[in-house]
Image (cartoon, rainbow, N blue to C red):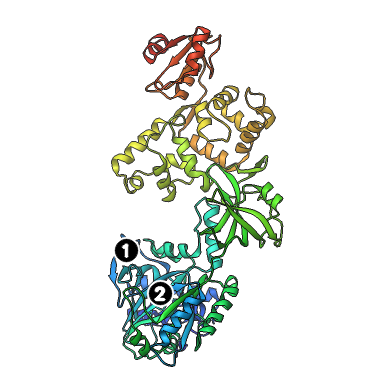
Amino acid sequence: MVEEPADNPYVRDPDTSFAPVEELSEGDAREQVRRLREAIEYHDYRYYVANDPIVADRTYDTLFERLEALEDAFDCHDENSPTRRVGGEPLDELETVEHVAPLLSLQSSGDADEIRAFDRRIRDRVADVRYSAEPKFDGFSVEVVYEDGGFDRAVTRGDGREGEDVSANVRTIGSVPLHLPDGAPDFLAVRGEVYMPRSGFQELNERRIERGDDPFANPRNAAAGTVRLLDPETVADRPLDVFFYDVIDTSATLDTQTEAFALLRELGFRVNDETTVVDDVDVVIDYRDRLADARDELEYEIDGIVAKVVDFDAREELGSTARHPRWAFAYKFPARTGETTVERIVVQVGRTGKLTPVALLDPVDVQGVTISRATLHNAAQIRDLGVQNGATVRLERAGDVIPEVVEVVEGGDGDFAMPETCPVCDGHVVQEGEHHYCTNASCPAQLRRSLQHFCSRDAMDVEGVGAEAADQLVEEGLVESLADLYDLDRDELAALDGWGERSADNLLAELEASKTVDLGTFVYALGIRHVGTERARALAAAFSLDDLIDASAEDLRSVEDVGPEVAESVAAYFDEAENVETVERLLEAGVSPERRERDDELDGLTVVFTGSVPGYTRSELTELLETHGASVTSSVSGATDYLVVGENPGTRKRERADEEGVETLDPEAFEARILSRL
């Protein structure tokens, strides 16, 4: 148990009415920094380890903010200051570090006969055997080293001999001591298991799903992936915790595992309360069976128990193989199969705006794969199956790949309803059949896809904004709406990874050139669901932009090839205030959609295309010909004047043209006979 700091004014009922920073002398400021660090570290211990805070969250925040202000004002930063828990500068890479001592793996089995055989081998060589029985955490193992009472480094297990330096990330975990109390050993290396609590894992996955990211498969993967990130600020924002369970090396004298645990607790390390000492292998087996029954109630994942010989001299006598110590054994749980609990149902927003309900599950093994989520497709499936939060369900892997809820074994605690507004952006949600869609094109879950579509060749034709560039612009916060494209800053673009001044200049020039655009192309570029190039041209022919924005679904249905579903989709798009604001901002930025008047140069001419014409997209050719009075159709008939046969053509249209006696033109003849007239 860590002792409370004596005579520290920021521990009990602290006075937070601080004098202005600029009124402090440097000496007074540094003394206040020392006391604040000491107090905040103690408050961290009470909150994260002892689970018994003694100040309110707001008071803690005030102390923390004061410490940050003083460190900045007087340039007295320290790597082991509590302020470093919020993260630091991104890392270029994780360096490799050798361990203090090898971190070996354990012998393991789920067979009771195997642990009995282990016990017999121990007793053949050691008298009076006792075991430390401990949970086997399903997390991410790290070595943490302290020198002269301060946090020095944290290293992943790696290959057991050396691992990656993850000090900047482990330092952000609240339950990891940054300073040890007075009297601590001069040197101490400990081993712990970083994990993600079940509740934090579910909340993290919920946030990822709602914004369209792939969820983590299980808490272990989430913890391992987080610890190895190169951005400590991201790590600090994720719910990591740690249990410490071994003293690897120390300048102190320890004789047993019991003494090691006592030292860890005394120094403020978080040690699991389920740890116990037993003197019989049958009690070890009973311990494992008890934890197997209780594992679903724990806030952390375990996949078995570990039995370790308590006495360190006996361990020395037993020794190790090249791979594992002879004095420890992991007695694992049987794999979970088939049935699990629905922790909660959340809604994922896809790149097209489609809302899909997803069941977040208590992770379960199904045919050797850990499953933590299952798509529920739509509200109808949820209703038909009777899936609810808290329900026990049976899973199958459809085609041995996709997890699927096939049956509710036991009901939960409430009906599920699809949201009326988007869980990501609060945009309006419309229902089409059994499916639901967010109508806000600037919804973050849809924005990458909307950005690519807007800049595509058949839309605004802005070269240089493919999938990778769209991801960068959104992830860096440079584009939060389609209209932000026309406010991009040259220097910010040039600073993006893989860009530079030339790339920035090229994109800005492309954007400037795109401002003059046909209204039909502009409507298509907005990415309204069910509105392709032909429907966009038809809408532009029937309405001005202002009239289109104000049109009702009934008005829209007067346009040829605009049925009820399309009309409702267009009306819903312009009913969304964010979409109208985006259009208005695009116009303010200089985008000028024009309704191009048709002339009669090609009036009465009907053309069909098969294959591609070099230098043009099909949409560009269609728009060009129809602007001059021609009709472009998708099938050959007796009314067709020409079939243009480009590169990689199909055979059916050519066969039909032969049957109907329709003249065919290759790209050169098409250019000479038709395009040259325009």
Q: Is residue 480 above or below residue 619?
A: below
Dot 2 surroundings within 10 Å: few (below 14), some, or many (20 or more)? some
**Which amino acid is tagged 1?**
Leu
- State the residue in front, 311 or 11: 311
Q: Looking at the picture, how far across and down is residue 196, in whole percent?
A: 49, 68
Residue 51 in view of the camera: no
Q: In the current view of this chain or complex, which residue is farthest to the top?
A: 661
Please name the residue shown 29% across and 44% down the image.
500
Q: Looking at the picture, how far across and down is residue 551, in whole percent?
A: 65, 30
- State the residue in front, 671 or 219: 219
Please name the residue shown 35% across and 34% down the image.
509
Q: Is residue 311 above or below residue 405?
A: below
Q: In the current view of this chain or complex, which residue is farthest to the bottom?
A: 128
Left or right of 366 on screen, residue 322: left
Query: Tag 2 or tag 1, which sits nearer the N-term?
Result: 1
Q: Which residue is mark 2?
A: 106
Question: Which labelled disc corresponds to residue 108?
Answer: none
Question: Which labelled disc corresponds to residue 94?
Answer: 1
**Which amino acid is tagged 2?**
Leu
- State the residue in front, 33 or 215: 215
Dot 1 surroundings within 10 Å: few (below 14), some, or many (20 or more)? some
Q: Is residue 675 above or below residue 302?
A: above
Left or right of 166 on screen, residue 198: right
Q: CA distance from mark 1 to mark 2?
A: 26 Å
**Closer to the eye: label 1 or 2:** 2
Q: Looking at the picture, how far across and down is residue 215, in whole percent?
A: 51, 56
Please name the residue shown 35% across and 85% down the image.
318
